[in-house]
């Protein structure tokens, strides 16, 4: 493996200059490779290595500003997570690692890696708000969308996208979070379930871990109607995802009128993924991502790496998404169509209309 990338442009230099050409931020840190969840664990360091190698092969590196991720301050974590949860993670860290739950483990480098992953989004916001890019891609691990306010789970220690969204809310923004990981982002949903200023939309395989994400989960209190789950059967292909986006999601997004979009980009919906059963390709991720980022103006678009456990699929999908962030349609693989899921979307459209979501 090539040595992971480091800065071409030191971030301190950005404070005095504004990028005028089309550019994106690529935020990462090789210390995220030091999170070692165990031999043969699906969420292995090679995942991030595949993403970094994909980036190094792109043709537009001159338009990308590489930023070294910095760890989030621990005090910020309490905006999203409870004290007992953070204490538990730190206790495991002090012991040199250990099991968090049945599927989630820590090594000696995991706590720093998790804080780097959580801090990357905050850095992205600062630089995008200063006009230093059109969009940002946070190439970090461990992933975060399963981490709830009180529990780390599902390979996730801290909820990276939620920590970023909370900061945006403190700035008076309205945030759209789209999660197209094959697994439902239960943690992100839980954190914002009663918040009317966050529209959470998840397209995921169902049934599948963690067992949440039914169409009936739509929010509560002031946040009622600000959660939209689109559960899809095994074998669903890209044409169904695009139909769901165009016919179900877009009307809700237009009504909500977000100022920022955060994308939990899990690539485990790819047809090559070893632990899920969807039928997507990197070409589908290109088209879907392009639609998602068009919901807000340039400079307000932020992507987080979530799941995805086939290395080749990760490479191809990362390439597709990076090009999409640059405003380019690049299809490393043909788009998929003709799979299952059309009937589920038809029923979902009817349900949405009947309940005036």
Image (tube, rainbow, N blue to C red):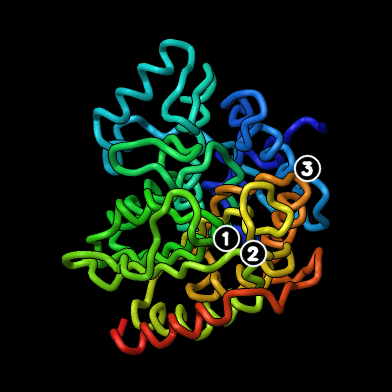
**Residue situated in front as seen by the camera: 80 or 122:** 80
Place of residue 18 in the rendered image (x, y in percent of width and height, measured from the top left): 57, 57
Q: CA distance from mark 2 to mark 1?
A: 6 Å
Kind of element beneath mark 2 = helix
| Mark 3, residue position | 53
| Mark 2, residue position | 325
Place of residue 25 in the rendered image (x, y in percent of width and height, measured from the top left): 61, 52
Which residue is situated farthest in the left direction here?
A: 221
Q: CA distance from mark 3 to mark 1?
A: 20 Å
- Above or below, 110 against 178 in this view is above
Kind of element beneath mark 3 = helix
Kind of element beneath mark 1 = strand
Q: CA distance from mark 3 to mark 2?
A: 18 Å
Q: Is residue 21 visible?
A: no
| Mark 1, residue position | 135
Q: Quadrant of the C terminus?
A: bottom left
Q: Is residue 231 visible?
A: yes
153 left or right, relative to 84: right
273 left or right, relative to 351: right
Q: Residue at x 81, y 63 (%)?
A: 332
């Amino acid at each position: 493996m090539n040595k992971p990338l480091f800065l071409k442009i030191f971030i301190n230099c950005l404070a005095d200059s504004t990028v005028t050409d089309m550019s994106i931020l690529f935020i990462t840190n090789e210390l995220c490779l030091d999170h070692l969840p165990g031999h043969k664990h699906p969420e292995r360091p090679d995942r991030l290595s595949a993403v970094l190698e994909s980036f190094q092969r792109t043709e537009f590196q001159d338009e990308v500003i590489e930023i070294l991720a910095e760890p989030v301050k621990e005090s910020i974590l309490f905006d999203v997570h409870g004290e007992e949860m953070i204490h538990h993670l730190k206790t495991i860290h002090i012991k040199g690692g250990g099991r968090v739950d049945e599927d989630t483990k820590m090594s000696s480098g995991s706590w720093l890696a998790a804080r780097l992953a959580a801090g990357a989004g905050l850095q992205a916001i600062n630089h995008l708000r200063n006009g230093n890019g059109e969009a940002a891609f946070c190439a970090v691990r461990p992933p975060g969308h399963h981490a709830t306010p009180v529990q780390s789970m599902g390979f996730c220690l801290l909820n990276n996208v939620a920590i970023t969204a909370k900061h945006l809310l403190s700035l008076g923004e309205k945030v759209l979070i789209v999660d197209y990981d094959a697994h439902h982002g239960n943690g992100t949903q839980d954190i914002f379930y009663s918040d009317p200023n966050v529209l959470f939309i998840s397209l995921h395989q169902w049934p599948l871990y963690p067992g949440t994400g039914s169409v009936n989960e739509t929010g509560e209190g002031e946040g009622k109607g600000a959660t939209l789950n689109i559960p899809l059967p095994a074998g669903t292909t890209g044409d169904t995802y695009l139909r769901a986006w165009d016919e179900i999601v877009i009307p809700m997004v237009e009504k909500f009128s977000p100022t920022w979009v955060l994308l939990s980009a899990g690539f485990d919906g790819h047809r090559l993924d070893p632990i899920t059963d969807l039928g997507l390709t990197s070409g589908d991720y290109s088209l879907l991502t392009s639609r998602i980022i068009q919901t807000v103006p340039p400079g307000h678009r932020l992507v987080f790496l979530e799941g995805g456990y086939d290395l080749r699929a990760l490479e191809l999908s990362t390439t597709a998404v990076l090009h999409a962030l640059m405003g380019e349609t690049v299809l490393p693989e043909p788009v998929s169509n003709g799979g299952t899921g059309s009937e589920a979307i038809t029923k979902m459209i009817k349900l949405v209309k009947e309940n005036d979501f």
